[in-house]
Image: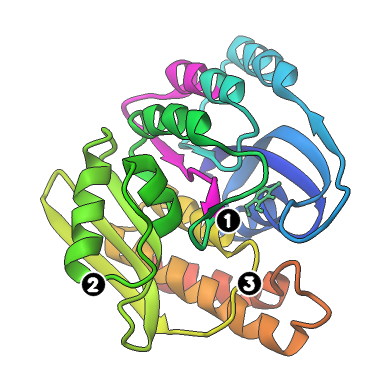
């Protein structure tokens, strides 16, 4: 059985980060160990007055214990990190637990729609860009990609811009950058990836849905991590991640008033399991 570790916060209410990564990766038949970086009462996207307990000090203690136990993982996957100090600790974690035969996947969670999430700034971006250089795969949206590269965020762009951005992201040092939320204003939305080893671009699209659903970046990155850990190729990994993410958005629409803070991803887990079975035949 494959085994991965994911390092990100627990937002106790709101359906993002660990509360989606854990059920999704587990549903794909993969053992999922977790290191929580912080505990928040809710995520920061639209709730007021949330609590934030920083767990930076616990990350190294957990890693030290795991080193003594000799634990090994098929993938190391990071999401929302709360401070520059946490990035440094996670970087050490990669040195300790990264191997030739496992993958490092960094989702550089920092913002969306051209804006930072609460609490992030330019100093954090610099450190995150360095962490991305240690990864095999990074999974930014266009906002995060623009921040990482220090280029202006473009709301509208074409394929040439997306491919330029992907090539520049590979210049940070990661083998395969994956851009999420890719949209060329042709009624489609999906993801694009660049395999810098083979100098090849990959795309996957579904019909665009004109509604932004919170936590979909975490859903995409979780499925993508599961897919590459299971040995799927890049096109398969993109397709399954786009399909499940869009299924989750579609399932959320009838529930949107009640569930404005997250997705109805639970309703689609059966489909995800079917997608995994089809791809693993
Ligand atoms: O979905 C990304 C994310 C993760 N964790 C926390 C967040 C967000 C986005 O707003 O607030 C705490």
Closest to the observer: 214 or 195?
214
Q: Nearer the viewer, residue 276 or 215?
A: 215
Q: Is mark 1 within 8 Å of ligand 1?
A: yes
Does 189 sit left or right of 245 as displayed?
A: left
Q: Nearer the viewer, mark 3 or mark 1?
A: 3
Q: Residue at x 46, y 23 (%)?
A: 94
Contact? badges 2 and 3 (CB < 8 Å) = no
Q: Residues within 10 Å of mark 1 (few under 14, many from 20)?
A: many
Earlier along the polypeptide chain: callout 2 or callout 3? 2
**Callout 2 environment at 10 Å: few (<14), some (14 to 19), or many (20+)?**
few
| Contact, mark 1 vs mark 2 (Cβ under 8 Å) | no
Q: CA distance from mark 1 to mark 2?
A: 25 Å
Q: Which residue is under mark 3?
A: 213
In the image, residue 95 above or below residue 111: above
- The circle drawn on residue 218 is 1
Q: Residue at x 60, y 78 (%)?
A: 249
Q: Is residue 99 magenta?
A: yes
Residue at left 20%, top 60%? 163
Looking at the image, is mark 3 or mark 1 earlier in the sequence? 3
Q: Is residue 21 left or right of residue 55?
A: left
- The answer to whether one can see residue 77 in this image is yes
Residue 174 location in percent, x, y? 29, 37
Q: Position of residue 262 (x, y in %)?
A: 72, 67
> Does dot 3 land on a helix, a strand or a loop?
loop
Provide the residue span drawn in magenta: 90-111
Task: Determine which residue is flagged by label 2.
Answer: 158
Instruction: Measure the C-alpha gap from mark 3 to mark 1.
Output: 11 Å
Tell me the number on the disc at residue 43. Answer: none
Q: Quadrant of residue 51?
A: top right
In the figure, residue 219 lies in which quadrant? bottom right
Q: Is mark 3 within 8 Å of ligand 1?
A: no
Q: Nearer the viewer, mark 1 or mark 2?
A: 2
């Amino acid at each position: 059985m494959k085994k991965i570790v994911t390092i990100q916060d627990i937002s106790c209410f709101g359906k993002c980060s660990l509360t989606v990564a854990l059920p999704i990766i587990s549903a794909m038949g993969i053992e999922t160990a977790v290191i929580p970086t912080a505990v928040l009462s809710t995520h920061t996207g639209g709730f007021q007055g949330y609590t934030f307990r920083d767990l930076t000090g616990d990350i190294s203690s957990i890693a030290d214990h795991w080193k003594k136990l000799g634990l090994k993982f098929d993938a190391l996957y990071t999401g929302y990190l709360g401070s520059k100090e946490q990035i440094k600790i996670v970087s050490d974690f990669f040195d300790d637990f990264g191997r030739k035969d496992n993958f490092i996947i960094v989702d550089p969670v920092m913002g969306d729609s051209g804006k930072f999430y609460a609490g992030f700034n330019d100093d954090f971006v610099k450190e995150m860009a360095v962490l991305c250089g240690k990864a095999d795969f990074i999974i930014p949206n266009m906002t995060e990609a623009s921040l990482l590269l220090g280029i202006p965020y473009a709301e509208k762009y074409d394929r040439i811009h997306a491919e330029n951005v992907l090539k520049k992201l590979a210049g940070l040092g990661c083998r395969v950058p994956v851009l999420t939320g890719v949209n060329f204003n042709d009624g489609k939305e999906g993801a694009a990836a660049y395999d810098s080893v083979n100098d090849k671009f990959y795309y996957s699209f579904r019909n665009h849905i004109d509604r932004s659903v919170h936590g979909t970046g975490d859903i995409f990155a979780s499925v993508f991590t599961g897919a590459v850990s299971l040995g799927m190729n890049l096109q398969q990994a993109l397709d399954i991640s786009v399909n499940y993410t869009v299924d989750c958005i579609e399932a959320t629409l009838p529930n949107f008033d009640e569930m404005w803070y997250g997705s109805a991803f639970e309703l689609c887990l059966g489909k995800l399991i079917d997608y995994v079975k089809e791809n693993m035949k």
